[in-house]
Structure formats: structure tokens, C-alpha cells
Amino acid sequence: MFSALPILLAAALAAPAAAPDWSGVDRYIRAEMELKEIPGLAIAVAREGAIVAVLAWGVRNLESGAPMTTATPVELASLSKPLTAMAVDQLRRAGKLDLDAPLARYLPEFASGWPGLTPRHLLRQTSGLRRWHDFEAPCCGQAGEFDLALAARKLARARFRQAPEFRYANSNYVILAALVERVSGLRFTDCMTRHVFAPLGMNHTTLHREQAQRWGLAESHERQWGRLRPSPPSFLGWYGSSQVKSSAEDMGRYLAALTSTSWEPLQAPYDQGWFLRSLPGLGMVAAHTGDLWGSNTAVMVSMEKRLGVVVLGNAGSVRAGEIARGVLERAAGLPGVPPARVPKTVDPDFWAILFLAAAWLIAGSLAVYVPRAWIEWRRGGRGFRPRKWTVARATMLGAMAAYLGLRLAVVGAPPVAALPKSLQTALPALVVAVMILLVAAALAGLAPRDHRGGQPLRRREIVATFSLGRPAR
């Protein structure tokens, strides 16, 4: 990615330059934090190989009130991908890895897949993998979830497509982490610490959560049922695509490295762990966000101005990428995008409340319909009269209910565990309600109302049935 690695490392360790007046950025950040309800935020800005600002606001934990500092580690989430790409690039420079050689040369388990698949396809997210392939790798407390060799074997079974277009998937960078581990001969965590973090002076950056907690890791915050609260994450992603924890100070050193020299040509829209696009006044920009349900981070670098910004926040769904752009534009002397609220539809808690309301609505409707249908059956107003089309419809509805139950109980268990806390409750509740609705519809189709026999029910008869515990007569 870089034309001179020694220059990059020297620039990252250089003394910070004198910081300009950041009062305008301070007002912008405070406004964003208020509108987006962010408990704590830290930023770093670097220009031409020097750190020019490292600032922090708010608290790292709403309950304890402990302050957010520039040394507070935050879950980077997908900002881990450019760091993984840096490890891959180092192996390339050392002559140990050819980005255009078949991947199976280094990971033989991929020999049975698309023979043209190369490490470069993974770096550019053009391997043919999709987001649903991510959960082929163990996660969410499953045995072996940090075993990259196991993840590679499982992902090797995925269907790769020749000459595919760009499709973002975490699994591309999980495979790259396995590649780094296999080619370097080191555990991925050790390789990243020795050959990426340490040379850049990122001495408070780690892949180990326990270590980050000893350094004062910022607590994740989720909105649950309308209220923002601290919420320890149940899922942090996989090695290679996520899991790195770092502070604004360390990420400032990383930014200094990124802005110290010219970049090698990259291919849009994605390459070497970066999304690439052109922005007015900034030229070509390399950017990436990191999104977890309880934290949100972003890095944005103007290649033309050799100016970069990192934003680390400890709440989910806050659109850190927009904040990074606002800071970058102001640091470049541009007006900058104005502060803005996050749309309700971006917040998973909005959908959790909607799903739970739908589940209650279905449950309420069934609570009225099922007893009424049962009384009609007992009075002869319904009868079991299966016909070909009613049996076919009932079979289809029953199969749909069984499929939903199987997905929820078996196949869907890991993705559900990866959801935000409120959705972990609301989505299964909605699925169960829909399952019961489908079964009720299937049975109603097999035992339709007999308009030629039986007597219509009156409301007082239904009430009497359930209050006295016997069918109405």
C-alpha cells in the first residue's frame, strides 16, 4: 500500500506537530454528540505524517461516569480490516506472498473452489462471498470461534463465483487473517502485535478484550426499548475483519503513517481495506467505518491533502463516518457538513419496538380468533372437510411454520445471538407469533365454517364459555 515502509514507521513515531485552534471542531463535535446521544467520543487528526490533534469528550461508561480520554481503547470493529491488509502487504513486501497467485497455494483447503481465486480478490472484496457467508465461520460463543484454521476450512465450502463484482463480506478478511497466520507462521494476534502495532508505536492496541479492559476499555452502549444504556457486547466479529481495540492516541500514530507518504494506486470502490470515493474539496478519499451494535468508529483520509481523521464512539448507530467527514472538512478549511440527527430507521431499537408491537398484535388477534374457532367446532359450526386445495394450502402453511421454527431453533441461532439486545427478544417473538398464525390458518383451512349447519355465536355465549369453563349451547 505504501511506497516506503521505513519512512512510514518513522513518521508515525515522530513528535506531534503544534495543534491549531480546534474550537470550531469542538463545537461541531459537541453538537453531534447531543443530537446523536453519544456518551463518549475521541478523535485524532494527522497531516503529512504528523499528529496535529487528539481530543476526547464525554464518558466511557454512562453508569460509572468514568471520563472518555484519548488513551481509552474502543472496539474498532471493521476498522480492523485496513490493519489486516497492512499485515498482508508486509508479507508481500517480504516476498512471502504473491497477491495474484492462487489462494490455494497458501491455503490448500481452497483448492476445490474457484481456481482463479487470489488474495487480491479477498482484499478487494471481489471473491464472490456474500454477507450471509460470514456465519459459516464459528461465532457468538461457539466452539472454535477464534480458530482461523477452522474458519478457513468452513469458508472454503462456500460457493465462489468467477469474475464477480464487488460485494462486501467480513468473511473475505477472515480468510486473509488465516492467510497471514499460515504464511507468517505466527498466531494472527501475535503477528499483528509484533509486525503492525508495535512498529507503529500502537502500544495500547490489542486483539485481546481482557487486555483492553485492563487499559480501561470504553463500555459499549445500545438503545434498548427507547433508552440508551451500557450493554456488554455478545458478538464482536471475527479476527481479520474485526476484534481490534485501540485508542485515539494509537490511531493518531496510525494516521500519521497513512498521511506520511504517497499511496500506491488502489482500485475503487474497495481495495486494501478501504472504500474509495471522491469528495468535493478533498479529492480522492480512503475511508472505512466500524459498526457494532454498541460502538461506532470511522477513519477518513484525503490522499490529495495527506490529511486524515479517526473518530471513536462508544454507542451504536451514530454514523461515525458522517462525523469523520465533518471533522476532515473543517480540518481542511472547508465549511463542513452540519450536525444532524440519526434517522429513526437506522436504529435497530426502532425495529425491535416495531417487531414486538407486531408480535403483540398477532398474539391479540389469535387470542380472539382461536377460542371463537374452537367454540364453533364444538357447536358444529366447523367441520373437518379436507379437499385437495385445502390440504395443499395447509401443507404449505405448515411447512412455512416448520421452516421458521427450524431457522430460529437451529440454523438461525448464531445470527440471532449477533443481533442487538432488544432485537434478540423482539425478532424471536415475532417469528413465534407468525409460526402460530400460520398453524392456525392451516387448521382453519382444514376445518372451515359450515354455513349450512350450526348456529351463529353471540358475544355473551363466548364470554360465558370461558367464564364457566364449558362450551356454549
Image (tube, rainbow, N blue to C red):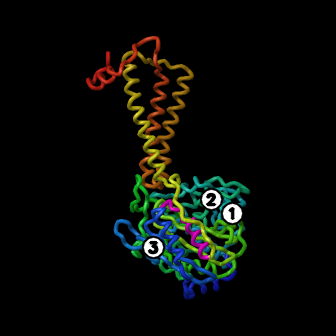
Can see residue 379? Answer: yes
Q: Marks 3 and 2, how far apart in space?
A: 32 Å
Q: Quadrant of residue 10?
A: bottom right
Going by the numbered disc 1, the residue's amino acid type is Pro
Q: Provide the residue span drawn in magenta.
A: 316-331
Q: Earlier in the sequence, mark 3 or mark 2?
A: 3
- Reply yes or no: does residue 468 show up in magenta: no
Going by the numbered disc 2, the residue's amino acid type is Tyr
Q: Residue at coordinates 54% horizontally, 81% vertically from top-left? A: 21
| Residue under numbered circle 1 | 269
Residue 236 image point, x, y percent: 48, 62
Q: Residue at coordinates 52% horizontally, 58% vertically from top-left? A: 342
Image quadrant holding the C terminus, namely: top left
319 in relation to 7, above or below:
above
Q: Nearer the viewer, mark 2 or mark 1?
A: 1
Residue 195 image point, x, y percent: 57, 79
| Residue under numbered circle 2 | 168
Residue 57 image label = 3
Q: Residues within 10 Å of mark 2 (few under 14, many from 20)?
A: some
In depth, the one of 202 and 412 nearer the eye is: 202
- Residue at the extreme top: 452
Q: Nearer the viewer, mark 3 or mark 2?
A: 3
In depth, the one of 74 and 445 nearer the eye is: 74
